[in-house]
Structure formats: C-alpha cells, structure tokens
Amino acid sequence: MTSSAWADWRNMSADELEGLPYMACTWNGTTVQGRLTGRRIGPVTVMGDHDLPVDVIITGRPNTAALAYRSIGVFNPTDHDREGR
C-alpha cells in the first residue's frame, strides 16, 4: 500500500466505509481491533478495554489495513496486519 492510499477513504461514501470488514491490526506491537461505523471505527480496543480515537480504516491487499490515529499518528501501512472476524 502506498501513501496515496490514504486519500482513497476520503472519496468513499459513509455507506462504502460502513461496509469495510472487521480488522485486527498491530501498532507498535499492540493489537488494535474494531468495526468501521461511518467515518469512525469503533469500538477500538488496545489489548484490553482502552479506547483509542481512530478516524478511519483503509483496506488494501488481503490481510492489510491502515489506521489513522488522531492522537497517536499514522499507522505504518507498510507493516502487514492480520484481518480478523
């Protein structure tokens, strides 16, 4: 996934974003999971019940996702994540 993929979600409708799959991702070795609802992903859980403010999830190749965190920074889309159900 290239950095240009970050622009893709901005052109998607809320319905299209709503349809993205449930993802489980890692950020700095910490598992983050949640289901996209509109332009937010929630609930987002980090190894327990600590919520993080997450703006969007982007899907690319299978087993790949990128999360944009408002307060933490940007998830590195070159790191391969695992998709969960």
Image: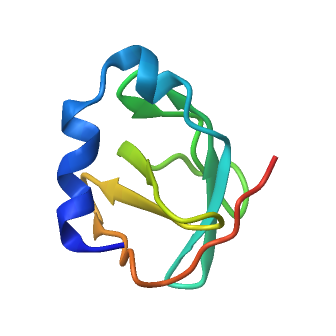
Task: Name the image colouring.
Answer: rainbow
Count the numbered circles shown. 0
* Image quadrant assignment for residue 47: bottom right
The N terminus lies in which quarter of the figure? bottom left
Asked whether residue 53 is in view, the answer is no
User: Horizontal and vertical percent for residue 36?
Assistant: 53, 33
User: Horizontal and vertical percent for residue 60?
Assistant: 47, 60
Is residue 77 positioned above or below 13 on the image? Answer: below
Q: Looking at this rendering, what residue extends furthest in the top direction? A: 15
Left or right side of 61 for 31:
right
Q: Looking at this rendering, what residue extends furthest in the front direction? A: 61
Asked whether residue 28 is in view, the answer is yes
Left or right side of 39 for 10:
left
Left or right side of 10 for 40:
right
- Residue at image location 27% in from the left, 74% down from the top: 2
- Residue at image location 53% in from the left, 46% down from the top: 51
76 or 54, which lies in front? 76
- Residue at image location 31% in from the left, 19% down from the top: 13
Left or right side of 46 for 79:
left
User: Horizontal and vertical percent for residue 66?
Assistant: 42, 62
* Image quadrant assignment for residue 84: bottom right
Is residue 84 positioned above or below 8 on the image? Answer: below
- Residue at image location 38% in from the left, 74% down from the top: 77
Is residue 79 positioned above or below 81 on the image? Answer: below
User: Horizontal and vertical percent for residue 39?
Assistant: 35, 27
